[in-house]
Image (cartoon, grey):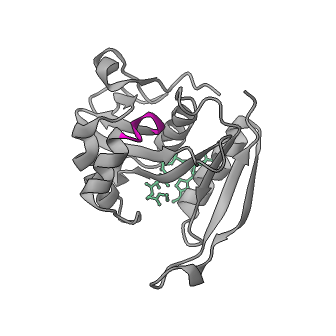
């Protein structure tokens, strides 16, 4: 799957790769770079997750691990030097033809502009994810924005999005909505 509006580059090459949201005027806010993260993005990922107001924050150390050992399956959106969105994912060892989205978030000021879909599309197109036939994610029952985002990803690729029980509420040690598994695909390789 490719997206002419989204370009990912390894962090080392990012200064040569700028993208602008389609139909938006060009200023620093709209020049968004999509790239894989490095260790120096770990702290910003932690801050971003907290700033979304909806995502469950993990430790700062966890985001350092994700930005290093799992960097090939993560994507950040950078505008004027600020991380304004991210897709944090990995390849599930027990399901080699899938790529799992653990967390996806966009800062409130950048929502509703198509950035979430652009990021997911570019994330699916990363070299480390390109051979996956399925994108999977758990989405809390009380998160319509995220549900719409994954349905939209399926629709834009012309594939199905099925939803089945996965992490039910009783599995959590504290009050927590159920997290059904969304399975999007099959993507053609
Ligand atoms: C979910 C989130 C990443 C979407 O980012 P975004 O950049 O606003 O999404 P997009 O603009 O690309 O929209 C993608 C689709 O989702 C829909 N959508 C976005 N926000 C929505 C909302 N609040 N309610 C219903 N649908 C919504 C859009 O309408 C769009 O579909 P369309 O093209 O058919 O209109 C963003 O709302 C967010 O960061 N939320 C907080 C964190 C979170 O809940 N993450 C998901 C759990 S892992």
Spot the residue most to the front. Answer: 94
Is residue 163 shown left or right of residue 40?
right
Instruction: Tell me which corner region of the image, top left, top right, bottom left or bottom right, holds residue 80.
Output: top left
Provide residue 167's location: percent of width, then percent of height.
60, 71
In the image, 22 versus 127, the foreground residue is 127
Vertical arrangement, residue 24 with respect to residue 137, above or below: above
Look at the magenta stretch and give its main secondary structure.
Answer: helix
Instruction: Tell me which corner region of the image, top left, top right, bottom left or bottom right, holds residue 51.
Output: bottom left
User: Can residue 106 be found in the magenta stretch?
Assistant: no
Residue under the point 35% across and 51% down: 107
In the image, 135 versus 84, the foreground residue is 135
Residue under the point 76% across and 38% down: 158
Provide residue 43's location: percent of width, then percent of height.
22, 49
In the image, 91 versus 26, the foreground residue is 91
Spot the residue most to the top. Answer: 16
Vertical arrangement, residue 23 with respect to residue 159, above or below: above
User: Can residue 72 be found in the magenta stretch?
Assistant: yes
Residue under the point 65% across and 61% down: 181
Residue under the point 37% across and 46% down: 66
Provide residue 85's location: percent of width, then percent of height.
38, 44
Is residue 180 shown left or right of residue 14?
right
In the image, 98 versus 160, the foreground residue is 98
Magenta residue span = 69-73
Provide residue 31's location: percent of width, then percent of height.
34, 28
Is residue 173 shown left or right of residue 121?
left
Quadrant where the image shows the C terminus: top right
Quadrant where the image shows the N terminus: top right
Vertical arrangement, residue 156 with respect to residue 88, above or below: above
């Amino acid at each position: 799957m490719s997206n002419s509006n989204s370009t990912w580059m390894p962090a080392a090459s990012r200064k040569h790769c700028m993208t602008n949201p389609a139909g938006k005027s060009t200023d620093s806010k709209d020049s968004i770079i999509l790239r894989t993260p490095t260790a120096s993005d770990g702290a910003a990922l932690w801050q971003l997750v907290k700033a979304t107001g909806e995502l469950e924050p993990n430790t700062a150390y966890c985001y350092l691990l994700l930005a290093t050992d799992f960097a090939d399956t993560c994507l950040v959106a950078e505008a004027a030097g600020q991380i304004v969105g991210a897709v944090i994912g990995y390849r599930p060892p027990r399901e080699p033809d899938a790529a799992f989205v653990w967390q996806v978030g966009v800062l409130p000021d950048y929502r509703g502009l198509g950035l979430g879909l652009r990021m997911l599309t570019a994330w699916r197109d990363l070299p480390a994810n390109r051979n996956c036939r399925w994108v999977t994610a758990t989405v809390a029952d009380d998160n319509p924005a995220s549900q719409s985002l994954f349905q939209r990803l399926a629709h834009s690729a012309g594939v199905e999005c099925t939803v089945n029980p996965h992490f039910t509420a009783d599995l959590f040690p504290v009050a927590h909505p159920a997290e059904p598994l969304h399975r999007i695909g099959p993507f053609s390789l």
